[in-house]
Amino acid sequence: MREPVLLVTGANGEIGHGLIERIGRDRREKIVALDLTPLDPRLAEFCHESLVGSILDEALLDRLVSRYEFRTIFHLAALLSTRAEFSPRAAHDVNVSGTLNLLQMAADQTEWSGRRVKFLFPSSIAVYGLPDLEEKARADRVREKSWNLPTTMYGCNKIYCEQLGRYYCSYYKQLGAADGVRGVDFRALRFPGLISAVTVPSGGTSDFIPEMLHAVASGQEYACFVREDTRIPFMAMPDAIKALLMLEAASEDSLSWRSYNVTSFNPSAAEFRDELAKRWNDVRVTFEPHLKRQSIVDSWPADVNDDAAREDWAWAPDYDLPRALDDYLVPGMRGRIEAGEGA
Ligand code: SER
């Protein structure tokens, strides 16, 4: 008998931290964590097993399958958008081939267990590509099916993996014999930039907002790498975790689509700085745009329309920007600084 468990890849990443802690506290399922680096000791108490390894290591995945029955997979491992531009081929390997490995593992498991594995996938606003600022202003709250013209390797990877997920969900082995349960119950969220009180992101292009926050909270200067008027959507990490868990729990019949926009607030970089200045005295932020990173952020929408998630599975964020700062980010960061953990 294989043991039923929940798998989290990219367990040490920003979403992995919030998700493992939340599931570990609230639910009884056993969590198996996989990451390239040893699991943060703070997460170990919530995990049944943590493995150091790559999603490209098929022998490792085979060993996992021989021991466990994955009921749900949260496939979070990825190279983010800025890092991916420095090594596009490596990004494709991790973001696409790694995802394909896991989808195939899940589909194989569905075939022998007779139960469709749930596969939760964080996609991104990076799947959108607006050609210029005029079009970005006109596009307003972008819907899921428009502007799917990414300009980054990461965005290309994400939109293709959404399509792979759709294939594994609805068309996998479509010419095979009709009987038997098959495929994967794939569900994706197109996340905006995420802001955590616990971790600082690395390698993303939406990092200017969380970097600004962590710098200000620890009394450091910050040179923001985009213009003051730059605007893209964001979300506080607890809402990202909430969205993942709501989408996981939604009944399959309620899903009219498999890749949903979700969002919470979308301050410009200067408006975010101004919100920080209401809460900290010593805010030293300058704007020194990095032209290439700026052009990536400019190609992402200023806002997204998340009506489909709201209608299909009752999505609504708990945190607008003031509440995210006052009830989550500011206390979380002050607590970390007082505990000597830095921001
Ligand atoms: N936040 C991610 C990045 O900037 C996009 O999903 O790479």
Image: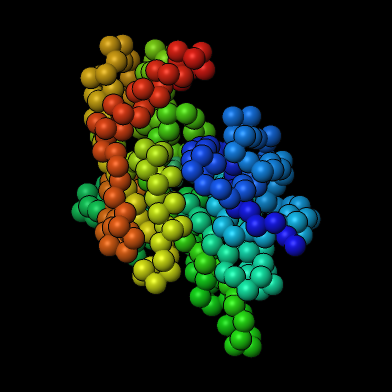
**Residue 89 vs residue 72, the one in the foreground:** 72
Residue at image position (70%, 52%) is 56
Residue projecting furthest to the front: 28
Residue 246: percent from left, percent from top: 40, 54
Residue at image position (62%, 48%) is 30
Q: Is residue 338 left or right of residue 45?
A: left
Image quadrant, ligand 1: top left
Residue at image position (36%, 27%) is 329
**Image height check: is 251 above or below 319?**
below
**Residue 245 vs residue 121, the one in the foreground:** 245
**Residue 45 vs residue 74, the one in the foreground:** 45
Quadrant assignment for the N terminus: bottom right
Q: Does residue 88 appear in the picture of this structure? A: no
Residue projecting furthest to the left: 138
Q: Is residue 116 left or right of residue 239?
A: right
Q: On the image, which quarter does residue 97 sit in?
A: bottom right
Q: On the image, which quarter does residue 276 sit in?
A: top left
Q: How is the image coloured?
A: rainbow
Q: Is residue 154 left or right of residue 290?
A: right
Q: Is residue 294 left or right of residue 134?
A: right
Residue 51: percent from left, percent from top: 71, 43
Q: How many marks?
A: 0
Residue at image position (65%, 57%) is 4
Residue 77: percent from left, percent from top: 58, 47
**Image height check: is 304 above or below 37?**
below
Residue 90: percent from left, percent from top: 64, 48
Q: On the image, which quarter does residue 48 sit in?
A: top right
Q: Does residue 252 appear in the picture of this structure? A: yes
**Image height check: is 130 above or below 230?**
below
